Image (spheres, rainbow, N blue to C red):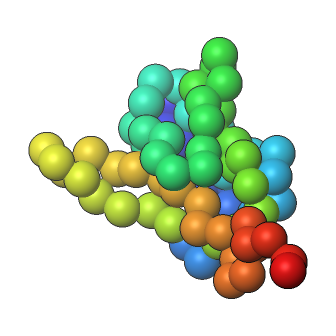
Amino acid sequence: MPALIELFLEQAAIAGNIIVRQRGTQHKPSNNVRMGKDHTSFALTDGVVEFKKGRKDRSYVSVLPFEGEGKAEA
């Protein structure tokens, strides 16, 4: 079964949003993304979705935090 991409490149993701529904691991999780028991990838933080090709032509999905996120206010 092919992967069903829920959020595409450069779309905003909120923590908990499903990014990819898949069977197997066509898209492996990277920064700020985790994989559930059923191989569904979801966002851990608010940010922008990014897909990249890695070694051996593997696809990785990550979420880049929005500008200013995670910085303490002084």
Q: Is residue 24 above or below residue 27?
A: above
Percent coordinates x, y for residue 58 in the rendering? 27, 45
Q: Identify the image quadrant of residue 73.
A: bottom right
Report whether residue 17 is seen: no
Report whether residue 21 is seen: yes
Which residue in the rendered view is the most extreme toward the front?
Answer: 74
Compared across the picture, whether 47 is left or right of 20 comes to right
Percent coordinates x, y for residue 56 in the rendering? 13, 44
Quarter of the image with the C terminus in it: bottom right
Q: Nearer the viewer, residue 1 or 51?
A: 51
Which residue in the rendered view is the most extreme toward the top?
Answer: 37
Percent coordinates x, y for residue 70 in the rendering? 74, 66
Give the residue displayed 65% in from the left and 16% down from the top: 37
Percent coordinates x, y for residue 55 in the rendering? 16, 48
Compared across the picture, whether 31 is left or right of 12 comes to left
Which residue in the rendered view is the most extreme toward the left?
Answer: 56
Q: Is residue 41 above or below residue 57?
A: above
